[in-house]
Image (cartoon, helix red, strand yellow):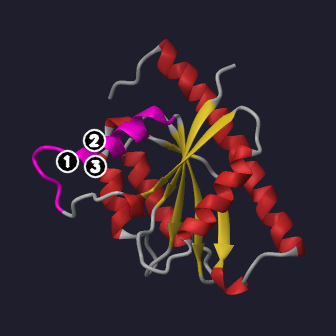
Amino acid sequence: MTPLRLAVLIGSTREGRVGDRIGRWFAAQARRRDGLVVEEIDLAGYDLPTALPAEPTPAMREFAGRVARAEAFVVVTPEYNHSFPASLKQAIDVAYDEWQAKPVGFVSYGCRSVGLHAVDQLRTVFTALHATTVRDTVGVDLLDGEPTGHAEERLRQDVRLLLDELCWWGLALRDGRAARPYAC
C-alpha cells in the first residue's frame, strides 16, 4: 500500500515560540509509525504576504503546492487570547481547494487549556474548507514543564490515538477522491 502523506503544519511564527519544538517532537513520533511519510511545514520559513495579492507570490504557490501534495494534516497551534495565531489563518487562506476532502488533526499548546480554544475555532475554519477534522487531539500544557512519567505516557497515547484516526480518515478519503473526485 502507498504510504499516507502527512504534513505537520507548525502554525506559530513568533520569536521565542515553542511550536517548532512541539511540531518536531510530534513529527518524530509520527515517523515511527508504518505507512506514513511525514513532512514538516514550518510557517516561519515562508514569506507569506499579510495582504493577499491578486496574483499568488512564489511563496504562496510553494505553500499551496505542499498542501495539495499532502493527504492528511496535523496542525500544531498555540492558543493566543483564546484563539489561534494570525499567521496560521493567513496560511490556511493561501490554499483553498487543496484542503478539501482531507483529514485534519490538531496538536495544541497553551497554559491550562492546552490550546483547546484555538482548536475549537480551527475546526470551524477547516469545516468551511470542506476538510474533515478528527475528534481527538494532543494537548500540551506549557505550565507542566517537560512531560515525564505518566504525563509523557499520556501524550504518547494521545499521539497514537490521533494518528489512528488520521490514518483511517486519510486512507478512506484518499480512496474516495480516487473513486470520485471531490466537487462542491
CB-based contact (under 8 Å), mark 1 and mark 2: yes
Q: Amino acid at mark 2?
A: Arg
Mark 1: few/some/many CA within 10 Å (<14, 14-19, 20+): some
Q: Residue at the spot x=82%, y=65% of the render?
A: 154
User: Does the magenta segment cover residue 60?
Assistant: yes
Q: Residue at the spot x=62%, y=35% of the render?
A: 169
Residue 98 at what x, y percent from top left? 37, 36
Quadrant location of the C terminus? Answer: top left
CB-based contact (under 8 Å), mark 3 and mark 2: yes
User: In the rendered image, is residue 126 in sight?
Assistant: yes
Q: Nearer the viewer, residue 101 or 146?
A: 146
Residue extending farthest to the left is: 54
Q: Which residues are magenta?
A: 51-70
Q: Secondary structure at mark 1?
A: loop
Q: Is residue 106 left or right of residue 145?
A: left
Q: Amino acid at mark 3?
A: Ala
Residue 106 at what x, y percent from top left? 58, 57
The numbered dot on residue 61 is: 2
Residue 30 at what x, y percent from top left? 70, 48
Q: Which residue is mark 1?
A: 57
- State the separation of the CA atoms marked 3 and 2: 5 Å
Q: Nearer the viewer, residue 132 or 145?
A: 145
Whether residue 131 is situated above or below residue 154 in the rendered picture: above
